[in-house]
Amino acid sequence: MVHQQLIANDKAQRLSLQQAQAIPVADIRQLLDQVCDPEIPVLSVNDLGVLRDISWQEDELVVTITPTYSGCPAMTTFTDDIRYTLLQKGFTRVRIDTVLAPAWTTDWLTESGKQKLEAYGIAPPREASNSKAVLMGLDPKVKCPRCGSAHNHQVSRHGSTACKALYQCDDCQEPFDYFKCI
């Protein structure tokens, strides 16, 4: 209970090392739900599966993140926002490590994250498939997040960001992004 009160405190007071290390990692992970993707603001670093680990190494809180793809421009923002959030809650020694292996995959998106994508108007990635159609450049069959129709077509392999493709629904005529399977 004391740990939740320390994290819930909006005043930037410095936590002692003993206080900080007494806060369960699960509570710190929950705190980082405030850190959202700058390109898809309904998704947190937890929803995306970008937040890989939180641990203590001596007197330093180490947060490990993985980019959604090499060169993802959101990584700098993630790093800055994670550090800011933790410093605002009183953690004084914070290190953010970026790891590239294992490579991020859309399988790491939480179910909640997929639901948030759809509610936001972005078709979530489909489940992994053994279909060779993807290798041949054939469009995956996706559901329109607005009307639910499976009748749509790909307008462009590149949507508003590199991790999305642009589709248009043939029934409601609305354009929508599809979060590509990676």
Image (cartoon, grey):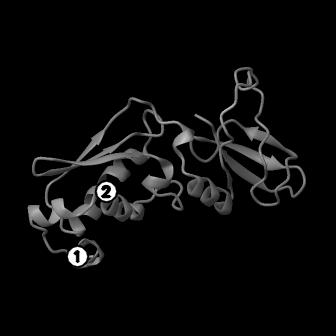
Specify the label residue 2 is tagged with.
1
Specify the label residue 154 is tagged with.
none
Q: Amino acid at mark 1?
A: Val
For residue 82, say whether it is visible.
yes
Which residue does the image show at 43% across and 53% down from the upper left?
Answer: 45
Mark 2 lies on a secondary structure that is helix
Residue 78: percent from left, percent from top: 37, 52
Q: Which residue is mark 2?
A: 82
For residue 162, say whether it is visible.
no
Residue 38 versus residue 8: which sits nearer the camera? 8
Left/right of residue 6 with respect to residue 47 in the rendered view: left
Q: Could you tell me how many numbered marks the image carries?
A: 2
Left/right of residue 89 with respect to residue 71 in the rendered view: left
Q: Is the C terminus in the top left, top right, bottom left or bottom right quadrant? A: top right
Residue 134 versus residue 165: which sits nearer the camera? 134
Left/right of residue 75 with respect to residue 97 in the rendered view: right
Residue farthest along the right direction in this orientation: 171
Mark 1 lies on a secondary structure that is helix
Residue 176: percent from left, percent from top: 72, 52
The quarter of the picture where residue 146 lies is bottom right
Left/right of residue 67 with respect to residue 95 in the rendered view: right
Q: Amino acid at mark 2?
A: Ile
Residue 129: percent from left, percent from top: 69, 30
Query: From the viewer's perspective, is residue 18 above or below residue 176?
Result: below
Residue 73 versus residue 128: which sits nearer the camera? 128
1 or 2: mark nearer the eye: 1
Which residue does the image show at 78% across and 39% down from the upper left?
Answer: 154
How crowded pointer 1 is (Cα within 10 Å; few <14, some 14-19, many 20+) is rated as few
